[in-house]
Image: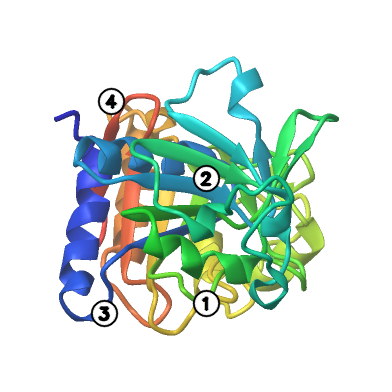
Amino acid sequence: MNETVFGMIIGELLAQKRKTDFSVPVIVAVGGGGKTASLFNLASFFADSGSSVVITTTTHIRDPRFEAEKRRYDHLVIDPDMSLRESEKNNTHPDGTTHPDGTTHQDGITILGSGEITEGRRISGIHSDRVASLCRHFGAVLVEADGSRGLPVKAPAAHEPMISTSATMVLGLIGLDCLGKPMDENTVHRIELFSLVAGCRPGETIRPDHLASLARSEDGLFKGTPVDALRVIVFNKADILSSDTEAGRSVEARLRELFSRRNQAWDAAIICSHREGRAKLLSN
């Protein structure tokens, strides 16, 4: 079984909640860069554990068929009707086939979208209220619900993120390559909003304390998260923090100091490097 460390940590956090709250995990990724990598990492973990998995989006994702980095999946399904609200759905296509939420699941990893966007080679998402129905047919539902234009950190606009009310866990992604950089459009998506929620002025150096403010704010990293969903901060790209340098040790120590204890804003914090296949809990 090819279990990833990141997947094992997420699995342990889910196991603590699964006892009473849900049967099928619905894991939603929001925030900065690393959402897609996190979800495909988890998809492999669940698939290797024997679960059928669907990866979808309520915004859009890059089409894996055209990515230089080959991602693992078994099926790709494009269903235009999945863009409709649940109340508007019609369970049968004109050709007599059934919707993904009206049939039994497919084994392995399925990628589900409502359309193909030729420009940018992306897949458009499904309506957020269609996410819950996928739990009837898959053992794990993974949803990308936010966009960041590939930048490591962001603050959400009024219409963001598009989180399903059925979410059992929300992953708030932050790329550690934002630290030590000036707060500008080269590093932050929606700099005006980030300045408000993180207390970081344009041009100011981004510090761990700013990320803590982003995570705590009701208009920040976990905006729109269902009350009962687990909130997990994921600090991606830990490989840029070399433990062999004083600076790297100092940054990790400060992150641990800020995020080691759960509170009302988050339930756990993970620092990881998907590229190197390593991860660890910062929180107790």
- Marks 1 and 4, the one that precedes in the sequence: 1
* Left or right of residue 203: residue 69: left
- Upstream in the sequence, badge 3 or badge 4? 3
Q: Where 149 sits versus 27, above or below?
A: above
Residue farthest to the right?
119
- Residue 16 position within the rendered picture, expressed as x and y whole percent measured from the top left: 16, 69
In this view, the mark in front (1 or 4) = 1
Amino acid carrying mark 2 in the image: Lys
Instruction: Give the amino acid type for the residue marked by disc 4 in the picture.
Output: Asp
- Residue that label 3 marks: 21
Visible in this render: residue 171? Answer: no
**Residue that label 2 marks:** 35
Residue at 83% x, 29% y is 118
**Mark 4 highlights which residue?**
244
Q: In what element is the residue under mark 1?
A: loop
For the N terminus, give its image quadrant.
top left
Which amino acid, by three-letter code, is at mark 3?
Asp
Whichever of callouts 2 and 1 sits on the residue coming sooner in the sequence is 2
Gap in Å between the C-alphas at discs 2 and 1? 19 Å
